[in-house]
Amino acid sequence: MAARRATRRERRYRLDHSPVLGVAAAGAGHRSILLTAVSGLIAGAVLPMVVVVVPAPAHLMPWAWLVSIVSLAGLGALSAQVGGARVWSGMWRVAFWGTVAMAVTTAAGALFGALA
């Protein structure tokens, strides 16, 4: 079957439902979108690197947990505010499920002997 060209309505729907709607709607080019994505990834990597370097090795796991949960709560609150949802519910939802995910990952690491 030959591929058909997308209609104007289909192209508009894709733009309206784009995961990068804020950037796409602003008319940003590919370079701006790439720069935004890369800077977000770098900013997200700085905090875990600081947590790994600063505390003593004996206290690494509790510090990693604490900083991760606080970061998740902050990002949940920020995303809820930006999305127009209730801030407290967004913060607790992200922090709770992030903590559950970390607990499952830690349990799997302990089960397979991967924890120090």
Image (cartoon, grey):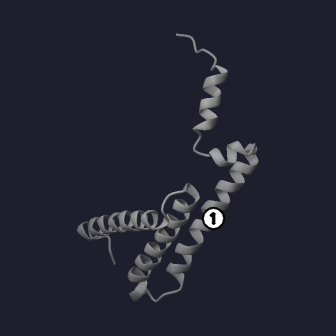
User: Image height check: is 54 above or below 71?
Assistant: below
Q: Nearer the viewer, residue 61 or 79?
A: 79
Question: Image quarter for residue 46?
Answer: bottom right
User: Which quadrant would the C terminus be assigned to in this image?
Assistant: bottom left
Q: Which residue is mark 1?
A: 42
Query: Residue 64, percent across and down?
Result: 44, 77
Residue at 39%, 88% in the rendered image? 58
> Nearest the camera: 39 or 79?
79
Whole-percent x, y for residue 27 in the image: 75, 42
Q: Position of residue 105 (x, y in %)?
A: 33, 65
User: In the image, what residue occupies the spot 64% across and 54% down?
Assistant: 37
Q: Under tag 1, what secondary structure?
A: helix
**Vertical arrangement, residue 105 with respect to residue 6, above or below:** below
In the image, farthest residue toward the left: 111
Total number of numbered labels? Answer: 1
- Which residue occupies 47% across, 68% down? 72
Quarter of the rendering containing residue 79: bottom right
Residue at the far top in the pictured view: 1
Q: Relative to residue 11, is residue 106 depicted above or below?
A: below
| Side (left or right) of 17 relative to 24 | left
47 or 12, nearer to the observer: 12
Q: Within 10 angstroms of label 1, few (less than 14), some, or many (20 or more) residues? A: few
Label 1 amino acid? Ile
- The residue located at (47%, 75%) in the rendering is 70
Image x and y of residue 104, in percent: 29, 64
